[in-house]
Amino acid sequence: MNRRAGQGTLFLVAMLFATSGALRLGSGIGVALAQAEDVPAASASVEATSCESPAALAKALGLREDRLALREAAINDRQAALALADAAIGERLVQLEAMEAELRGTLALADGAAEADIDRLTAVYQAMKPKDAAALFETMSPEFAAGFLGRMTPESAAAILSGMSSEAAYGVSVIVAGRNAGAPKE
């Protein structure tokens, strides 16, 4: 029996501890739920920081302002660097356009000079005796000879072709005739 009486006391003490814990837990939950229903989440975080001292709050705001000033300075530096890069790119573009125009002029001058040389050489071949010119044209590649014969007057070209061998004359004639075969008709 003695043993049974000790177990009852132990049970009673355990029940008292459990009841005390439940009451403490229950009273804390009720207060927390009441605060959560009355105050929105954004206000709760402001209220939590408002519990700090005004000096700590001022210090935190000062640190935030310093970080923002550093960010703003970095952004201003980037903008200045971009402006410099943009100006340099603009200068390079102007230089490239000027160089391109100069190159076009040089190419046009070279093309004009080459065209003048070909015109002079064509005139020389036309002025030659057809028999001599035909012997010279026989030694040229057919494509090269066709270029000159295409620029000559039909009478001069005919006289030179008649002095060439039939195979060479035929080859040059095919090239002259086929030069513009692939050109659009309309």
Image (cartoon, rainbow, N blue to C red):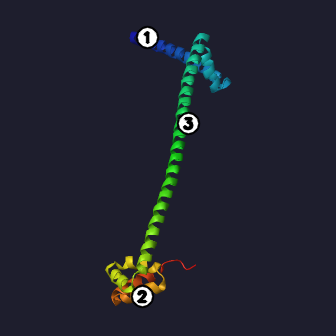
Task: Tell me which label, 3 or 2, sits earlier in the chain.
Answer: 3
Query: Which residue is label 3 attached to?
Result: 83
Query: Which residue is label 2 attached to?
Result: 159
Classify mark 1: helix, strand or loop.
Answer: helix
Q: Nearer the viewer, residue 91 or 105?
A: 105
Image quadrant occupied by the N terminus: top left
x, y percentage for residue 10?
A: 44, 12
Q: Residue at x 38, y 79 (%)?
A: 145
Q: Nearer the viewer, residue 45 or 33?
A: 45
Query: Which residue is label 1 attached to?
Result: 5
Left or right: where does residue 20 sit relative to residue 30?
Answer: left
x, y percentage for residue 97?
A: 53, 50
Q: Residue at x 52, y 50 (%)?
A: 98
Q: Nearer the viewer, residue 15 or 23?
A: 23
x, y percentage for residue 6?
A: 42, 10
Q: Residue at x 60, y 22 (%)?
A: 45
Query: Which quadrant of the view contains residue 165?
Result: bottom left
Say what amino acid the circle numbered 3 marks: Ala
Classify mark 3: helix, strand or loop.
Answer: helix
- Look at the numbered discs 1 and 2 and tell me whether their residues touch, using CB distance below 8 Å: no
Task: Tell me which label, 1 or 3, sits earlier in the chain.
Answer: 1
Classify mark 2: helix, strand or loop.
Answer: helix
The reply to whether residue 179 is in sight is: no
Label 1 neighbourhood size at 10 Å, few (<14), some (14-19), many (20+)?
few
